[in-house]
Image (tube, rainbow, N blue to C red):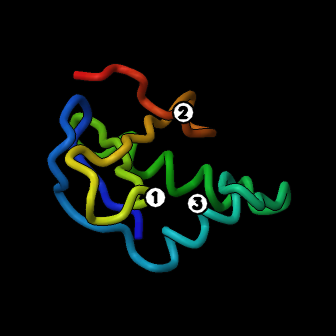
Amino acid sequence: MLSVCRRGETAVAGALTPAEDQALRAAFGRFAVPAARAAGAAVIRRYQHAGAGHWLCCDCLGGSAVLLPVLVPVAEAHLRRHQDAG
């Protein structure tokens, strides 16, 4: 399940709802469906504008990861994996 962290941080601040998680996976996941992009972009927009902004933490490495991979909302329409090792 994807979770949310504050922009610029990697500490998990909360979890997405199952519906939001599925919308993002359908829109931008490995087996993305182009028709699902609008619903996924709506979820990104909601979290990008909440407070000072939020990033998404991916669960792809399981519980063994020291730091969860972070997905950064870009242009209110898609996600980019954060590359900064810090």
Residue at the (62%, 39%) spot, across then down: 77
Q: Amino acid at mark 3?
A: Leu
Disc 3: CA contacts within 10 A as few (<14), some (14-19) or many (>=20): many
Determine the secondary structure under disc 1: loop
Q: Whole-percent x and y of residue 75?
A: 57, 28
Number of marks in picture: 3
The image's mark for residue 22 is none
The residue that appears at 35% across and 51% down in the rendered structure is: 57
Q: CA distance from mark 2 to mark 3?
A: 12 Å
Residue lying at 55% horizontally and 39% vertically, measured from the top left: 79
Location of mark 2 (residue): 80
> Which quadrant does the C terminus fall into?
top left
Q: Is residue 15 above or below residue 49?
A: below
In this rendering, the label closer to the viewer, 1 or 2: 1
Looking at marks 2 and 3 on the same chain, the residue that comes earlier in the sequence is marked by 3
Residue 72 rendering spot, x and y as whole percentages: 44, 35
Mark 2 is surrounded, within 10 Å at the Cα level, by few (under 14), some (14 to 19) or many (20 or more) other residues, namely: few
Q: Would residue 19 be found to the left or right of residue 62 on screen?
A: right
Residue placed under numbered mark 1 in the picture? 60
Identity of the amino acid at label 2?
Arg
What is the x, y in percent for residue 51?
22, 42
In front here: 76 or 85? 85
In the picture provided, is 76 more to the left or to the right than 72?
right
Could you give the CA–CA distance between mark 1 and mark 2, rounded to whole angstroms?
15 Å
Q: Residues within 10 Å of mark 1 (few under 14, many from 20)?
A: few
Disc 3 from disc 1: Cα separation: 14 Å
Residue that carries the numbered disc 3 in the rendered image:
24
If you read the primary sequence from the N terminus, does the residue marked by circle 1 or circle 2 appear first?
1
